[in-house]
Each structure stands twice: as C-alpha cells, then as structure tokens.
Image (cartoon, rainbow, N blue to C red):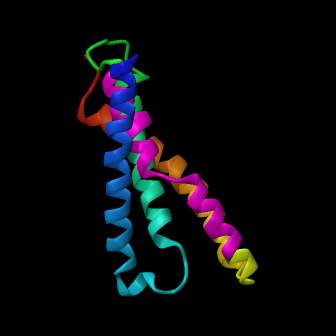
Amino acid sequence: MALQIMMVAFGCALGGVARFLLGKGVNAQPWASDGFPWATLIINIVGAICLGVVAEFYLERESSSFRMETYLLLGTGFCGGFTTFSSFSLEMLNLIKAGAILPSIAYAISSVLLSLLGVFVGMHGAKALFPPN
C-alpha cells in the first residue's frame, strides 16, 4: 500500500508541474489572450488522450506486464494531477458571471466532447501503435 501511495503522489506531482508549465506556455500565446480558458481546455484534452493511452494498456489488456503501480503513477497520479475539473468549473462560473453565455456553452460542450474524443483517440492510437499480443 505504501508503494501505491508513493506512485500516486509522485505521478500527481509530475502532472501538476506539467499542468503549470503547459498552462503558462498556452497563456503566453497571443491567441490565448481573449479571456477564453484555452489553457484548461487544452490541458484537459491532452490529459484525456494520455489517460486513454494508459487505460488501453492497463484496463483493456489482460497482460499483467503493465502493472498496477504503473497505472497508479500514470493514470491516477499524472493524469489526475495534470487535468482539472475544478478549474473547468470555476472558469465556467466566471464566464457565466461575466455574461459570456455563448462562450460558456461552447466551453462546456467542447470540453466534454473533445475530452471524450481524446480518450477514444488515445485508446485507439495506443492499440494501433502497440497491438495487443
């Protein structure tokens, strides 16, 4: 159990740092200065793709070569620390409070649909690149 907790904690730390760095990078772009929460949207889509790849290896394959600790490190830890539903929720509320109803609707729909698509692409991309034995 201690190893599993350490794997989640380490993955979460790496995911949080990666989220911070990618968020800073996205927010520094001229096209991201329009008040729309581009950084969180991009981070959550990238995280969904990553989780799709991890899920394909751990959840969809019966092989035990992709061990539980690896899933805890990459799936629960890294992807959990990298993506954020709470920031998405706060940004949605801020858009609504600012009267940006159409952008808030677009943000909600695009976040959910593109994240679902991201998991699908991640799983099927991993399956295509690394076919099960």
Q: Nearer the viewer, residue 76 or 3?
A: 3
Q: Quadrant of residue 103?
A: bottom right
In the picture, measured across the screen, residue 66 lies left or right of residue 100, that is left
Which residue is the extreme one toward the front?
Answer: 2
In the picture, measured across the screen, residue 49 lies left or right of residue 66, that is right
Percent coordinates x, y for residue 75 in the rendering:
40, 35
Percent coordinates x, y for residue 84 in the rendering:
52, 53
Look at the picture and state if 12 lies above or below 38. above
Residue 18 visible (yes or no): yes
Quadrant for the N terminus in the image: top left
Quadrant for the C terminus in the image: top left
Residue 124 visible (yes or no): no
Look at the picture and state if 122 lies above or below 62. below
Q: Nearer the viewer, residue 113 or 85?
A: 85
Residue at 44%, 63% in the rendered image: 42
Percent coordinates x, y for residue 127 in the rendering:
32, 31
Range covered by the magenta-colored residues: 69-94
- Give the main secondary structure of the magenta stretch: helix
